[in-house]
Image (cartoon, rainbow, N blue to C red):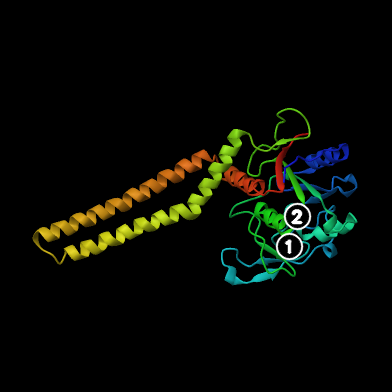
Amino acid sequence: MKKTPINVSPALRQAVGDMRAKALPQLVGLIMRFNEDDRTIRDLWSEGAGQNKHKHNPHGTDRLQAYRRVNDNDPTAGERAANKVVDAAGYHAEELFIICWDALLRGAELREDQIDTVDLILSKSPCHGASASSAMKLQGINEYFPIGCASKLASFVTSKDQGIEWRIAFLALAGSDAPDYMPIGGSGVDRLMSAREREIAEAALSQVRFRDDGAPTRLQQAAAHEQSAQRLQDQAGELHGRERGDAFGQAKSERQRARTIRSEVDREVQEKFRNARTQSVAQAQSGIAILDRLPNVDVRRWQS
């Protein structure tokens, strides 16, 4: 499927402008539209932990029941039914979009099989990483949506008909101090990433993969060398003469291998961290890359 940008109408541009004026660092707005039909334009807003329902958001009766894990780090700790409004964890705008999907279709007087395109414009790019929005599942569905709104949106998109074209744009990068992106030129929307930004995104992805997979594996190798060194040292205590010296020498070599591996891991972590800029921006870029890799999702930076 060829990826195409959002077709920006005057009504959509006005809705995004209104959202831009109201959005705050802790209040994320989302403008949505079905099938390029301006009559279906709707705004959704994040609701902070323990905060009341935003006045523009659907009522509790239009929200599917959501469930959260008691502890995202321990799936065996059980789950809790989230309050449909005023929940302890709150709701990100993207989560409300997923929870209210059925109600949004009803409001637009559309069936899901009538959807060709979905436009989403966010005041801030979807969160990503360990400290992002907690895992969530909906009534009637056994699988959890993952931690982070980038991953939740990706899971939601892949659960729908792959013929639907999703177009996502955002005003500011999550984790960035910049309140907005400065237009590069032209109007409407522009490609999300320059060559340098894509390089940063790949560096971020490389950093996350190394932290989650590569580094632990290498450190396990270092620990194995340490254990080998300790065994050789213990054996050396029971030996004499040349055999004793050889065993101590081997133990010393094993410890040096362990130190070398740890030093290499530390250097690689620091290098990947520098390449990916700050951790928060790197995570945001990595989250964007998750969506951008989907064949029926186009991610762009919004330009007014």
Q: Position of residue 44 (x, y in %)?
A: 80, 51
Left or right of 73? Residue 5 is right
Instruction: Give neighbour class at mark 2: few <14, some 14-19, many 20+ (Cα, 10 Å).
Output: many
Mark 1: which secondary structure? loop
Mark closer to the chain start, 1 or 2: 2
Q: Is residue 41 visible?
A: yes
Residue most extreme to the left:
241
Instruction: Give neighbour class at mark 1: few <14, some 14-19, many 20+ (Cα, 10 Å).
Output: some
Mark 2: which secondary structure? loop
Relative to 266, say whether 232 is above or below: below
Q: Residue at x 27, y 55 (%)?
A: 254
Which disc, if any, is residue 87? 1
Left or right of 102? Residue 155 is left
Assess whether mark 2 and mark 1 are in contact (beta carbons under 8 angstroms).
Answer: yes
Q: Position of residue 200 (x, y in %)?
A: 56, 39
Left or right of 133? Residue 278 is left
Number of labelled discs?
A: 2
CA–CA distance in space, label 1 to label 2: 9 Å
Q: Position of residue 211 (x, y in %)?
A: 49, 51
Look at mark 2 in the image and give the residue it sits on.
Answer: 47
Identify which amino acid the numbered label 2 is placed on: Glu
| Quadrant of the snapshot with the C terminus | top right
Identify which amino acid the numbered label 1 is placed on: Asp
Q: Is residue 58 visible?
A: no
Which quadrant of the figure has residue 216? bottom left
